[in-house]
Image (tube, rainbow, N blue to C red):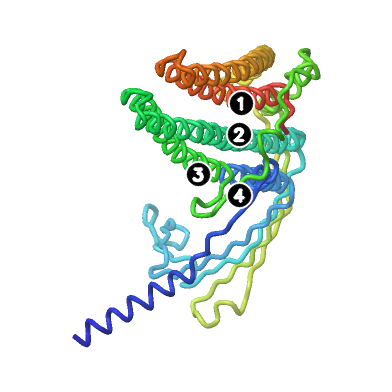
């Protein structure tokens, strides 16, 4: 029992220590811009893209370092357990012709210490690589910008989804409140014998369905909050509330009039990335052509050699040697490899030019499409607003007629159903309009 009690105490202390090391959940209240700013510093894809930019910087420094002196140190040690034997002709020592005398050259211990220095003097491929280093860094910087634009778009849409869900709950609450009042009135009238039980049941069914719909929407709202936290890179356990409302978002036709259809593709980061890729392929073509030119290097070496039959006296005497020289490499024939590499690079350049043209046409089409979709979404949203108002008016008139005895409960039920349908359609149209606004801004390169 004592062992079990001690074990329980240890587990309790460990759990308390673990809970104390865990960061406590935090509460945030974000506007759209604040949510975007948080995402740009916490979202994993943005962080990784920033690391790619740093990695590109290191690659450029590695490339530049190839033009600096290359210094290597060498050291070797040999212990000849058996010194190599060489056979010399016997006549050298007065022996009969055709005989050989075994002779051992060398000593038991040998060691060499040296330094080698090489300096690149001329290499066209290296020069072209230096010329393209800015373009190489530009590619990753633009990729970083593209990632931030993509994250900004996703965060904005997720933020709007939460706003729309909140609006939907407000509409449901309003409908539930007025329907609850109607249920109470109809129930009271039934008790007084003015209406039939079936009228109460019809309204009760609608009321129950509306309450269930609200509960489902609340669960979806919680999920939308989690999606928003995921898009901005926030831990799910943190609490998040929104500052901005739907009234802070401008949805009007004047936005469309401010965008220009011509050359909008030049503002798109996707087009700029393709431009950079084309430049890099052109630099690669130049580099391949430079392989036909010679290269020149300067070489300097110094070596100290140590030899002795006694290990303790090995480093007492050195036999140094050194040299200075040039190495010229002239390409003569490679079996057509360099020629075929140049042709492959030429094809890559042509393909990138075709891709750039296709990208330009595709982005222009995307901009025109986004403009039309946004205009249609605005028109649908305005139409659904009118339908919503009409549905409310129809419900109001139907309830008056029913109360005055000139209408039926079925008319009231149908009017209530029509209002719920109009509310749902309005909410969907509102979300479509908000999303199309984001797509319009991205299509015209206004999200940076």
CA distance separating discs 1 and 4:
23 Å
CA distance separating discs 1 and 2:
8 Å
CA distance separating discs 3 and 1:
19 Å
Question: Which mark sits nearer the N-terminus, 1 or 4?
Answer: 4
Residue 327 to residue 393: above or below: below
Residue in the foreground of this view, choosing between 259 and 297: 259
Residue in the foreground of this view, choosing between 143 and 16: 16
> Which residue matches tag 2?
160
CA distance separating discs 4 and 2:
20 Å
Could you tell me residue 280's position as x and y percent? 69, 28
> Which residue matches tag 4?
42
Question: Which mark sits nearer the N-terminus, 3 or 1?
Answer: 3
Residue 385 to residue 117: above or below: above
* Contact flag, marks 1 and 2 (Cβ < 8 Å): yes
Could you tell me residue 193's position as x and y percent? 34, 27
> Which residue matches tag 3?
226
- Mark identifier at residue 435: 1
């Amino acid at each position: 029992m004592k062992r079990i009690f001690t074990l329980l105490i240890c587990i309790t202390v460990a759990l308390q220590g673990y809970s104390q090391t865990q960061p406590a959940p935090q509460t945030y209240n974000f506007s759209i811009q604040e949510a975007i700013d948080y995402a740009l510093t916490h979202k994993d894809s943005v962080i990784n893209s920033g690391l790619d930019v740093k990695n590109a910087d290191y690659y450029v420094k590695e490339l530049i370092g190839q033009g600096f002196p290359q210094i290597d140190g060498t050291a070797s040690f040999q212990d000849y357990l058996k010194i190599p034997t060489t056979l010399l002709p016997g006549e050298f020592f007065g022996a009969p012709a055709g005989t050989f005398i075994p002779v051992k050259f060398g000593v038991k211990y040998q060691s060499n210490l040296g330094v080698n220095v090489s300096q690149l003097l001329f290499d066209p491929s290296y020069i072209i690589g230096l010329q393209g280093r800015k373009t190489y860094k530009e590619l990753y910087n633009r990729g970083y910008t593209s990632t931030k634009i993509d994250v900004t778009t996703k965060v904005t849409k997720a933020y709007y989804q939460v706003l729309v869900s909140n609006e939907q709950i407000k509409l449901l609450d309003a409908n539930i409140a007025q329907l609850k009042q109607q249920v109470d009135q109809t129930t009271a009238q039934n008790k007084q014998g003015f209406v039939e039980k079936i009228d109460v049941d019809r309204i009760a069914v609608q009321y129950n369905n509306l309450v269930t719909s609200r509960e489902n929407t609340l669960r979806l709202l919680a999920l939308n909050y989690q999606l928003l936290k995921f898009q901005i890179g926030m831990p799910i356990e943190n609490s998040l509330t929104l500052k901005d409302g739907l009234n802070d978002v401008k949805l009007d036709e004047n936005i469309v009039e401010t965008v220009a259809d011509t050359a909008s593709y030049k503002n798109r980061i996707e087009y700029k990335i393709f431009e950079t890729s084309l430049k890099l392929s052109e630099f690669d073509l130049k580099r391949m052509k430079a392989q036909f030119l010679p290269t020149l290097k300067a070489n300097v070496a110094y070596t100290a050699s140590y030899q002795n039959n006694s290990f303790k006296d090995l480093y007492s005497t050195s036999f140094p040697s050194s040299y200075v020289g040039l190495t010229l490499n002239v390409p003569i024939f490679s079996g057509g490899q360099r020629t075929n590499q140049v042709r492959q690079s030429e094809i890559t350049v042509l393909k990138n030019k075709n891709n750039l043209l296709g990208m330009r046409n595709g982005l222009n089409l995307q901009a025109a499409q986004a403009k039309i979709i946004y205009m249609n979404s605005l028109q649908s949203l305005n139409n659904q607003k009118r339908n919503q108002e009409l549905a409310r008016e129809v419900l109001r008139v139907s309830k008056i007629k029913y109360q005055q005895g000139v209408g039926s409960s079925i008319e009231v039920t149908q009017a209530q159903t029509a209002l719920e349908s109009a509310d749902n359609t309005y909410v969907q149209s509102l979300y479509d309009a908000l999303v199309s606004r984001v797509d319009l801004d991205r299509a015209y390169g206004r999200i940076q």
